[in-house]
């Protein structure tokens, strides 16, 4: 068995990095929500919460999904002191969203 090409989660010092997380679902809205749920699950598996996220990079197939779908979910999952965010339109297919996360590990 060969070594994986990338790590999906990597800890360095007091920082946790998550590779791009992509959600699944029948609708675009379901894929977006599933992406956030997956992020939350990975964080919780590493002893963190959504409140520990300090930076996110969001890749959207269609930038017009930002106000209609992404922003309401962002407010729901990050209700207090949201992380910084960079949002870019990319060549994803099928109404996809991909999010990379940087989280601070509390001391």
Image (cartoon, helix red, strand yellow):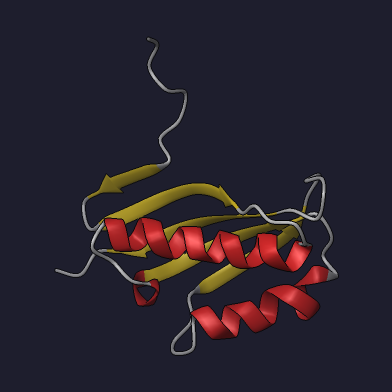
Tell whether 82 sits left or right of 98. Answer: left
Residue visible at 48% across and 58% down in the picture: 38
Residue visible at 28% across and 66% down in the picture: 48
Tell whether 9 sits left or right of 47. Answer: right
Q: Is residue 97 above or below residue 10?
A: below
Would you identify the image quadrant in which residue 49 lies?
bottom left
Q: Is residue 12 above or below residue 59?
A: above
Locate the N terminus by quadrant: top left
Residue visible at 26% across and 47% down in the picture: 12
Furthest residue to the left?
107
User: Where in the figure is residue 42, as x and y percent of width and height?
Assistant: 38, 56
Q: How many marks?
A: 0
User: Where in the figure is residue 8, as x and y percent of width and height?
Assistant: 43, 40
User: Where in the figure is residue 18, as x and y percent of width and height?
Assistant: 43, 50
Residue visible at 58% across and 85% down in the picture: 75
User: Where in the figure is residue 13, as x and y percent of width and height?
Assistant: 21, 51
Would you identify the image quadrant in which residue 27 lies?
bottom right
Locate the C terminus by quadrant: bottom left
Q: Is residue 19 above or below residue 25?
A: above
Furthest residue to the bottom?
80
Q: Nearer the viewer, residue 100 or 86?
A: 100
Q: Nearer the viewer, residue 14 or 7?
A: 7
Tell whether 69 sits left or right of 56. Answer: right
Furthest residue to the front?
26
């Amino acid at each position: 068995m060969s070594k994986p090409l990338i790590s999906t989660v990597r800890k360095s010092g007091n920082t946790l990095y998550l590779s791009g997380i992509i959600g699944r679902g029948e609708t675009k809205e379901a894929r977006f929500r599933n992406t956030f749920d997956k992020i939350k699950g990975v964080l919780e598996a590493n002893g963190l919460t959504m409140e520990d996220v300090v930076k996110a990079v969001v890749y959207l197939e269609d930038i017009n999904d930002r106000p209609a779908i992404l922003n309401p979910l962002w407010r729901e999952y990050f209700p207090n002191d949201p992380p910084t965010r960079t949002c870019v339109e990319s060549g994803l297919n099928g109404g996809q969203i991909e999010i990379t996360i940087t989280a601070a590990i509390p001391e």
